[in-house]
Image: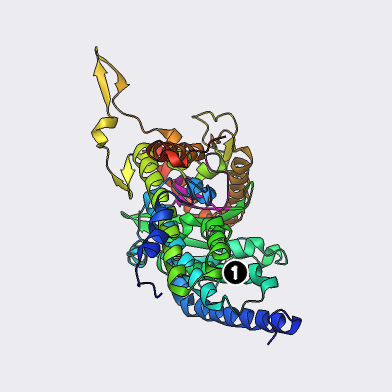
Amino acid sequence: MKKSFFSKQHQILITDPMGDQNPITIQVLGICSALAITTQLANALVMTLAVIFVMISASMIISILRNSIPNRIRIIVQLLVVASLVALVDQILKAFLPDASDKLSVFIGLIITNCIIMGRLEAFAMGNKLWESFLDAFGNAIGYGWILVAVAFVRELFGSGKLMGYQIIPLSWYDTMTVDGVEKSFVYFNNNLMILPPMALIVVGLIIWVQRSKNEELIEND
Amino acid sequence: MNKESNIYTFTFAIIMVLVIGILLAVTSELLQPRKKQNKNDKKMMDILSAINIDASRENAQEQYDTYISSSSIIDNKGSILQGDAFKIDVLFQYRDKTLLPEERRYPLFKANKDGEEYFIVPMVGSGLWGPIWGFVALENDYNTIYGAAFDHKTETPGLGAEINQDFFEQPFVGKKIIDNKGMFVSIDVQKGGADRSDPHAVDGITGGTITSDGVTDMLKNTLMIYNKYFSSLGKAEIKKDTLAIINNNID
């Protein structure tokens, strides 16, 4: 039986990793980058685009080569494909988005070690056709990306009062107020804790909490 | 063909590496001019930041041409040499351990802002984890600091990495590198806070002692060389100034 081009099974490949099979909140993969580059929304977006590109290209390349890759060196081949794609992204960023490249610095290189990518290559692209591999890669990259963007949104807004570098919280809120003739109280402070790495994990933890309370099937019974 | 044979595995690996190697090399070569341009723009922005000009990548060249009037190269004895100062990569020279001290070249940029003349000195040194660098602008007395901008590659976030923040750079303004006896003393980044009235010291960063010490050493080692050059050409002018003061007193 020939499956349709975008059947129910195909849709699940995209929707699952965005929700109930999310690589970050459910499988807890790729946490390191979620922690490191989510202080600013712009960085999270560039990182997301980079991961989408690397993930989709790597999955498609591996899927095409899957029947010719010698079994004994398959992990090395996967690593080689991912590493060269990452090197490519790094070069392109350096040439066209130098400021983003400076800020993301080592984290672009660390996409190589992003467990989500190697995980999907080994678990999915090695055994599935091109179109399915593309959808699976796209789904997982988006699933990773939206968490990254959500965390960065919260951290930049409350940590710096900005979004994409633009001031969102009115500057007048930061003014000192004169109370009883003494200038002392403040209306609003940026929450500096948001800028620090632990807050990324706390925000991810909150997302996991919301997600599991909405879908009780996700709660482990032990 | 047997996919699990050694020959197949080796052939596959070799072809794979060749294809990827060529692809990456070609991309890197093709993007080279753009990367170089970006690096130059960034350098111009850094130089301008020492005299408090905020240039963007788009107008870096234009702003640079507006404010930087000339540049020169000096050697470690303080004498002037021929060449294009902008092309000198001080970080590269700093890392090159085979380079003899007399082979090192020191670029100096002369800026003209609001009718005043400033001298911008690039410098490089070692922090805790990697290189630190900066640009310091001196006023035309070759002594008073007009502006300072520092940066780093891999210092600890929240500690040593803070050297590129305003709260660290701002106190340098108005400090002096020569004491009132005419001796070169540089500027000391002090642990535990500096006396505000001390013209040769600024506050260090708590928890960033090694980076702060790195800035002290960098300032001292670099400004010492430039001071040789300044004192060689400054003497005539200082004499003139002193004469003027004496004349004023007589009046």
Place of residue B24 in the rendered image (x, y in percent of width and height, measured from the top left): 55, 77
A79 vs A207, left or right, is right
**Which residue is at the far bottom?**
B1
Quadrant where the C terminus of chain B sits is top left
Check if residue B144 falls in the magenta segment.
Answer: yes
Magenta stretch in the rendered image:
B132-158
Check if residue A195 falls in the magenta segment.
Answer: no
Q: Residue at x 49, y 76 (%)?
A: B32
Q: Which residue is mark 1?
A: A78
Circle 1 marks a residue in which chain? A
Q: Is residue B83 visible?
A: no
A129 up-or-down from A195: above or below = below
**Which residue is at the far top?**
A180
Q: Foreground residue, A101 or B41?
A: A101
B208 vs A213, left or right, is right
Place of residue B63 in the rendered image (x, y in percent of width and height, measured from the top left): 34, 62
B6 up-or-down from B35: above or below = below
Q: How many marks?
A: 1
